[in-house]
Image (cartoon, coloured by chain):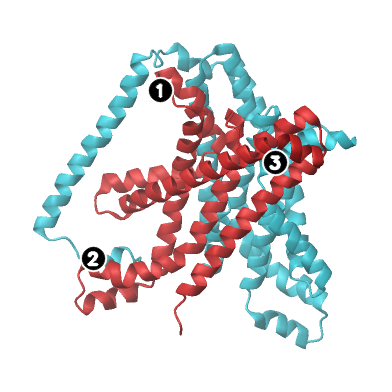
Amino acid sequence: MDQLLTTYLDELLAGLWVTARLTAVAFFGSLVVGTAVAACRVSPIVPLRAVGRLYVDLFVNIPLISLLVVVTFGLPDIGITFDLFSCAAISMILLGGAFTCEAIRTGVNAVSVGQVEAARSIGLDFFGVLRFVLFPQAFRSVIQPIVNVFIGILLSSSLAGVIGVKDLTLQVSEINNEAALGLTTYLLAAVAYVVISLLAGGLGARLEERLRVQR
Amino acid sequence: MSTVDSLFDAAGPRARRRIRILTVLSLLGIAGLAAVVLLRFGQAGQLAADRWVEFTQGPYLIFLLAGLGNTVTAAAASAVFALPLGLVLALGRLSVRTPLRRLATGWIEFFRSVPLLLVVYIFVSGLPQYGINPDIFWKLVIPITLCSSAVMAEIFRAGIKALPAGQSEAGLSVGLSRGQVMRSVVLPQAVRIVVPSMVAQLVVLLKDTTLGYAVSYPELMKTSNNLTAYTNHLIQTYLIIAAVYVVTNVFISHLARYLERRMSGRAARIGQEALEAGFG
């Protein structure tokens, strides 16, 4: 443990920083892409709907490693190259967008039809319905699914190590190959992931509690 | 009719015209995008027939099928071990005995929030330092089992809790013990409710086996990687393999959704929770 903290603290912190950055970029990117795809899926324009469905079906079902490998090692074949961090971020955003889209759709559909009909019947226009009736309620029911997407992104950011992005998991693995410190390093990293996940979950639960309708 | 659909009126003549114009524009956009992609491939010479037809040749197919076989074996083995383990964990988490409940809860929460790859690395290069050094197959299957047992436990728990309380109350009131109620009243119904979610969980297991790529277990991803070392046709190989995964998983998801539709809304709700757990 001493040797771990004196010799390798910098590596561990650097890994944690990369993991945090990758998770943050992928999460916010996923929110943007997911919202756009969800908008496509409900739009009255048929080709956009089809593209939205295809997008979700494709990226919900592709394994992240498979996509990472296509983006990192496949795309250079047709003359498109990114740095490794961007490759990981792009792949995770493509995947996360599909899951976010589904989370948003379920959340919006969890608001009962009667709410929207009632809002329209008292004369609210389209944006009024969205702003005063649909979004405040949908936001509540979307929190938990979005938190799950966040945790999914955090855990899958470890796969970026497979293409050589030095995130926490890869750092831990390399430290271990160098110094064979037993399970301590791994458990330290595991604790970091568990703490971030639990924090995200707790934050989501508190937000949900605060926004709950008092009935 | 879903909530989203109820937002819009039926389109009038002007809106219909606008929708038609936007439809045409979006079609042009999609076609343009497809053309750009194809042009890219063409310019780089990646569309040459010999780079694609090789995948229809016997030796290539046999090579890749062997990888697919290993993928299926690993996923199936993980499912066989994770299912009963998940059931035991769910029962533990619902147990009235506090230490048992804490243990199961801790296990589930830990393995739900630790990356699978980290657990795989523990088995690949952590545990061998203590003399625990199983075959590479088990170094992949045991971590997958550990991580997915936690998710399956939550699905089982959701299934058990979805049953009306009257079911177990009725069982208790006719004099059955808690164990008997669980065994002969609750579980037979709960297990049926979670079948669609468990089928959907196969998708996650199949995805999880791709970690074999990171630890050189010769499943489909690793096999295709080996193949590219020989042919050097990277983008073709990886795209085709990605397509194989997508088609397989879409098929399994549709099967799960079909099973779900045949049941009540309870199965659908649990299924949604399972989907959210399936990232990565």
Q: Assess disc 1: are there few (<14), some (14-19) or many (≥20) residues with their C-alpha within 10 Å of its C-alpha.
A: few
A148 above or below A131?
A: above
Q: What residue type is labelled 1?
A: Ile
Give percent across and percent down for residue A134. Answer: 33, 69
Q: Assess disc 3: are there few (<14), some (14-19) or many (≥20) residues with their C-alpha within 10 Å of its C-alpha.
A: many
Instruction: State the separation of the CA atoms marked 2 and 1.
Output: 41 Å
Q: Which of B256 and B246 is in front in this view?
A: B246
B22 above or below A110?
A: above
- The answer to whether residue B132 is visible is no
For disc 2, the chain is A
What residue is disc 1 on?
A80
Count of numbered badges drawn on the protein: 3
Q: Assess disc 2: are there few (<14), some (14-19) or many (≥20) residues with their C-alpha within 10 Å of its C-alpha.
A: few
Q: What label does residue A203 carry, if any?
A: none
- The answer to whether residue B89 is visible is yes
Q: What residue type is labelled 2?
A: Phe
Please state, as top left, top right, bottom left or bottom right, where the N terminus of chain B lies in the image: bottom left
Q: What residue type is labelled 3?
A: Leu
What residue is disc 2 on?
A127
Left or right relative to A24: residue B156: right
For disc 3, the chain is B
Left or right relative to B26: residue A170: right
For disc 1, the chain is A
Query: Residues at marks 1 and 3, common chain?
Result: no
Q: Are marks 2 and 1 in contact (CB under 8 Å)?
A: no
Instruction: State the separation of the CA atoms marked 1 and 3.
Output: 31 Å
Left or right relative to A204: residue B222: right
- Chain B painted colour: cyan
Residue drawn at point x = 46 percent, y = 14 percent = B51
Query: Residues at marks 2 and 3, common chain?
Result: no
Q: What label does residue B118 carry, if any?
A: 3
Q: Are marks 1 and 3 in contact (CB under 8 Å)?
A: no
